[in-house]
Image (tube, grey):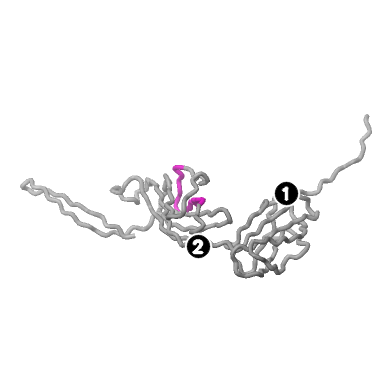
Amino acid sequence: TISKVSITLSYEKETKETFDIVALVEIPFDDAISFSHRVLTTQNSTYLQVKGSNKTIGPITLLKNALNPPEGCSVDEERVPSTGLHTVLHPKCDASFVFPIRIMETAEDITTHYQFSLWFSSPSETFANFLPENYNVQYNFTISKPRIDYEISFTSAPTSFIGEMFPFSFSVVRKRSSSSEVTFTVDGNGQWLIIGQSRSVLSLSPGEPKLIHMNLLPIKTGWIALPKVTLQGVSDENIAYQPHSDRVKISPKGEFDCRCVPRV
């Protein structure tokens, strides 16, 4: 970043006259914070994540932040998670900010321009003392909301036991895709044995759900993520996943000692 800095040199002659020499000098400054972003889209929500990395050699204190969305979009302020005021960010460390975004239906496929602003302070002597005490950096970027071509909804029981059959079903709805056929794949992620069709071709009419039933056999205990369902040739960002619950609790089978103990 190239910034223009005004340097003033004042001196007094023997005649007691004072003079100022003013020069405008271009000085390169390295960006104090580098930014990146990503977008997560579901059928009903869009989340924008902005990450900032401290590139200075000293700690900085994050004071506040703001996202300026374009026309047709807005930040759902009631659902913005708190990032904590006056958080200290050390060198080479990152901070993440998440914003739920409301996007008008008419703006779904339009590329939009955003501006993220971050205010911070720093006691580091690497910052010149003529700069303001609180600094403001801005990050300008563009995003576009991916269109939703398919919706996949899951139905499953909330709990089960290790080694017991577990019923699992999901439905696929064609929303905006022009293709009437799609191939699905179910991946057990090394935590489930799949009993039934783990890969097949579906013929879909627009707006009409196609229901697929199968059984699963859990091979691990704990809170286990449901199998991953993907559609061949379709990116995850173009699929709205609507899980009934994204995890289920798999418990070990209990062993009980039913022997009778005589009273003494």
Image point (74%, 59%), residue name: 192
Mark number displayed over residue 158: 1
Mark 1 or mark 2: whose residue is earlier in sequence: 2
Question: Whole-percent x and y of residue 110?
Answer: 47, 62
Q: Are marks 1 and 2 in contact (CB under 8 Å)?
A: no
- 27 and 202: which is toward the camera: 202
Image point (87%, 42%), residue name: 257
Question: Whole-percent x and y of residue 88?
Answer: 45, 45
Looking at the rendering, which quadrant does residue 43 occupy? bottom right
Is 98 within the magenta?
Answer: yes
List the residue tagged with mark 2.
109
Measure the alpha-carbon separation of dots 1 and 2.
36 Å
Image point (40%, 53%), residue name: 56
Q: Is residue 263 visible?
A: yes
Q: Is residue 55 visible?
A: no
Q: Nearer the viewer, mark 1 or mark 2?
A: 2
The quadrant the N terminus occupies is bottom left
- 114 and 151: which is toward the camera: 151
Is 26 within the magenta?
Answer: no
For the residue marked with disc 2, what is the amino acid?
Asp
Image point (20%, 56%), residue name: 23
Question: Whole-percent x and y of residue 144?
Answer: 49, 61
* Label 1: element kind: loop
- 6 and 244: which is toward the camera: 244
Q: Which residues are magenta?
A: 85-101
User: Few, some or many C-alpha atoms within 10 Å of disc 2 (few <14, some 14-19, many ≥20)?
Assistant: few
